Image (tube, rainbow, N blue to C red):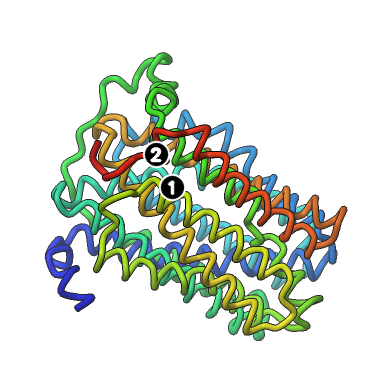
Amino acid sequence: MFFSHYESLFKQSAFMRFWLARVMGISANQMLMLGIAWHMYDITGSAWDLGLVGLCQFIPALLMALPAGQLIDRLHRGRIFAMCMMLQASVAVVLLWAMLNHVESRGLIFVIAVVLGINRSFQMPSQQAITPLLVPKELLQRATALSSTGVEIAIIGGPAMGGMIYTQGASAVYACCVVLFVAAFALTLSVKYRHVASHLAASWHSLFAGLRFVLQRKVLLGAISLDLFAVLLGGATALLPIFAKDILHGGPQELGFLRAAPAVGALAMSIIITRWPIERAIGYKLLAAVAVFGLANIGFGLSTQLGLSIMFLAVAGAADNISVVTRLTLMQLETPDEMRGRVAAVNGVFIGASNELGEFESGASAALIGPVGSVVVGGVGTILVALAWVELVPALAKRDTMTS
């Protein structure tokens, strides 16, 4: 039944090659980030330093976001994505060299985080802007759901494999990352599509066109900002090494299970959405999903059992997937092709703020009130945001269907 609903997409060979490249690249990225997080906590034992890794990624990603979106609309998006894969392969090579020569340090990890932040500003909008060029419009929602499924497979497999491989040493993780990134680079270059450069992207005025486009559309702005505040407050990713090591008394393998758990829930939800797409009352369902995300994070923060913690993270991932698929589908349907790179870049700023800046917020608050307090307070804040958006963004709350 699952495959029958994807059959028409499987026939889109360019889309499937790019889908596979994304799965390999994101798997490698997840392994890389797991290695970096555990490595940093092993070196310093500091929640503050774990938060600073997120901040070091966010600042360059924020500064580069709008120029990146402009370039993505002017240049070949597939080649930009391919170069992002090769840059991350280079990062993994540097970390592997540092491990083998025993020169790894806190400072090196911060520098690596800055490079990954710059890379993210190009990778996220380029991969989002490519998908609509590879499938017919009528397949876009299912293509978005299948893309989300691939991402979740990568986020499940990447940390799980990374945690197991890390038991052989961080150098083994980084070596595997190099292989996967290079494979993703080569596969992306094989994806062919008709590239039409945006002539409007060449002026300074157009640099901010994506931001103006989002600000003028209350539903898009509401959906993107909702995700920003929900993950900014409710995300616990940066603190997972602390929960794995100090609260659940595990190691890198347990950290891998925790990092993979949200993706397990998200993958299950992707399959459900593919079988039964969200067609009516999408606004209220989106807000309800964000509230469930907050509740699940509260449960995770209070849990002291590995199995229970994994369950709460899986529920959080399932709820978050509803937000991701809804937001991306709305964005793709309401944005003209020549604007997709810049609008995706704006979306990337919000996502980067929620993820990387959220990691800094989590690390800073954990340093002040402890990891449990940080996650629980963040979960409560997420629920309050979902309730507030009913009144603050009524256009989003009352949105009935994907198409206006």
**For the residue marked with disc 1, what is the amino acid?**
Met
Q: Residue at x 50, y 65 (%)?
A: 317
Viewer-proximal residue, 170 or 204?
A: 204
The circle drawn on residue 336 is none
Q: Can see residue 102? A: yes
Q: Residue at x 52, y 63 (%)?
A: 29
Q: On the rendered image, what quadrant is the N terminus found in? A: bottom left
Left or right, 99 with reference to 70: right
Viewer-proximal residue, 69 or 181?
A: 69
**For the residue marked with disc 2, what is the amino acid?**
Ala
Left or right, 82 with reference to 133: right
Quarter where residue 291 is shown: bottom right
User: Residue 238's x, y, as percent?
Assistant: 68, 60
User: Residue 293's x, y, as percent?
Assistant: 55, 60
Q: Can see residue 116? A: no
The residue tagged 1 is 124
Label 1 close to label 2 by CB (< 8 Å): yes
Left or right, 65 with reference to 145: right
First reached walking from the N terminus: tag 1 or tag 2 = 1
The residue tagged 2 is 344
Q: On the rendered image, what quadrant is the C terminus found in? A: top left
Q: Secondary structure at mark 1?
A: helix
Measure the C-alpha gap from mark 1 to mark 2.
8 Å
User: Residue 233's x, y, as percent?
Assistant: 65, 50
